[in-house]
Amino acid sequence: MTMTEMNPASRNGVDTATLFATLDAVKQAPAAAQFQFRAHNEWINGTHNRSSIGDYFGVGEERTHEQTFVFDADHPAVLVGKDNGPTPVEFVLHALASCLTAGLANIAAARKITLTEVSSTVSGDIDLNGILGLDKTVRNGYQQINVRFSVKGDASPEVLRELVEQSRSRSAVFDVITNGVPVAIDVDVA
Amino acid sequence: MTMTEMNPASRNGVDTATLFATLDAVKQAPAAAQFQFRAHNEWINGTHNRSSIGDYFGVGEERTHEQTFVFDADHPAVLVGKDNGPTPVEFVLHALASCLTAGLANIAAARKITLTEVSSTVSGDIDLNGILGLDKTVRNGYQQINVRFSVKGDASPEVLRELVEQSRSRSAVFDVITNGVPVAIDVDVA
């Protein structure tokens, strides 16, 4: 028995014992899996604004991250901004990459596969004639998103590919981006 | 004539002269509006990974942001992570808030409305029985996203609400999230 087999809790940095215990706990109490995530945004100037991500609801109560994470967004000069942060659409690509990658590490650990390297590039093609209102046949958002993964680990190419496929099939952000979500907007002008 | 009327280029921090010049330039050369945005992600450990956002294509050539922006994502302990960053799904909420807010500032400037305060909270409801594979009737992603805007400026409540509505109707991220985008995934296991 190798150390890895003796101590599967450390595989890929995933605490698999806790992962399986969490799954069992949610099986017993499905309501624990009801979460609400939030971002609080403040406009700064022009296309520059800033979000704080700290509080959320989950496992039956209000919770906070260990720190409040703060992110700026802006447009580059070529899109009439000051480049104080990525564009909003670039954060969507980061969200997709990070969701697929987190899932991949969890699934690999659950299947007792040790990963040595995972990297990805997510690219999104967008025709800004849509948001600029110059061509009504062009959508506002990305027309196509492409993800290119590089995965290395102690399994066959077929098994490594299957990890990505399973991560895709269980990815929250992949679902949001490919299938869409209803969005309601309320405005307080008081 | 007030200073604001004499110098509309500064309204809301939006360089409206450049904004309109950009619109005219794209009208003359629509191909300039073809952009490709990218995020490069590296897995670190467990659910912790990191994206770099720096290079993109637009206005006919490869470009770079003024700096490379780096963002960590992770899961909190309650979701078997180390809380080194927000969850991937929280970045989706930031993307939506920042896109709607940037558009709002641009549209207000174009309509000669001076904004004094814009803030928003975006919340997303998600049942993790989906991604945990515990209930096949539950989707992986958000079931509903709600945006609550607070907008103040030198216009009537009706006009301020109309700014938000116009921003919504021209938002790239709102389109992506509500209507979905095709995502292709390639895997290199060499």
Image (tube, coloured by chain):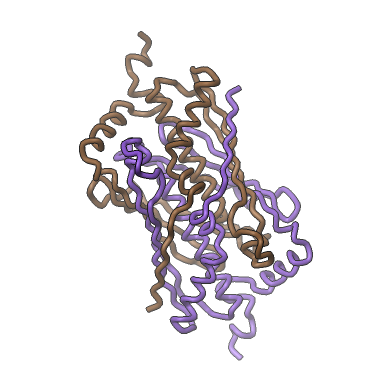
Chain colours: A brown, B purple
List x then y, in percent, for residue B182: 57, 46
Horizontal relation, residue A91 to residue B58: left or right: left
List x then y, in percent, for residue B99: 52, 61
**Image height check: is B80 above or below A179?**
above
Residue A48 lies in quadrant = bottom right
Check the picture and name the quadrant holding the N terminus of chain B: bottom right
List x then y, in percent, for residue B107: 57, 72
List x then y, in percent, for residue A33: 29, 43
**Image height check: is B20 above or below A10?**
below
**Image height check: is A184 above or below A57?**
below
Horizontal relation, residue B143 to residue A28: left or right: right
Residue displayed at 58% across by 80% down:
B112
Q: Residue furthest right?
A: B28
Q: Residue furthest top?
A: A1
Residue A105 lies in quadrant = top left
Residue displayed at 44% across by 40% down:
A171
**Image height check: is B53 above or below B115?**
above
Residue B7 lies in quadrant = bottom right
Q: Residue furthest front?
A: B137
Horizontal relation, residue B95 to residue A15: left or right: right
Check the picture and name the quadrant holding the C terminus of chain B: top right
Q: Residue furthest left?
A: A28
Pick whichever, B175 or B28, lies toward us: B175
Figure disc tally: 0
Residue displayed at 70% across by 58% down:
B33
Pick whichever, A36 or B75, lies toward us: A36
Pick whichever, A184 or A106, lies toward us: A184
